[in-house]
Image (tube, grey):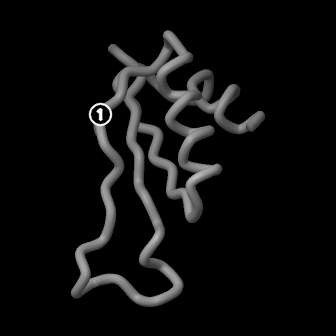
Amino acid sequence: MRLLQHAPDWLEPGGLLATISFNSLEDRRVKIAFLADERLERVTRKPLVAEAAEAKPRSRSAKLRVARRPP
């Protein structure tokens, strides 16, 4: 959780922050952190997930969320 709080400070204006979560609890924390932090704007409204042909059994639950620090 501390990473999500401090990461926007490390980004340059226009920089992107991407996170991959592997379960719903992690994904929820990332989503809430991106929404609550006024230093970030969401790039992906919904998380990106692998298509059925791409997904391996261990990675099929992976979700990618991206946010940007405004310029």
Up-down relation of residue 7 to residue 21 (above or below)? above
The residue under the point 41% across, 46% down is 65
Up-down relation of residue 49 to residue 35 (above or below)? below
Task: Please rate how many residues cluster around mark 1, counting C-alpha atoms within 10 Å: few if below 14, some from 14 to 19, many from 20.
Answer: some
Position in image of residue 44 (x %, y %) = 29, 39
Where is residue 9, by image quadrant?
top right
Q: Residue furthest right?
A: 2
Where is residue 36, by image quadrant?
top right
Up-down relation of residue 6 to residue 66 (above or below)? above
Position in image of residue 27 (x %, y %) = 54, 48
Which amino acid type is marked by label 1?
Answer: Val
Q: Residue furthest top?
A: 38
For residue 33, side relative to residue 57 (left or right) = right
Circle 1 is placed at which residue position? Answer: 43
Position in image of residue 14 (x %, y %) = 34, 25
For residue 34, side relative to residue 1 (left or right) = left
Position in image of residue 17 (x %, y %) = 46, 39
Up-down relation of residue 49 to residue 36 (above or below)? below
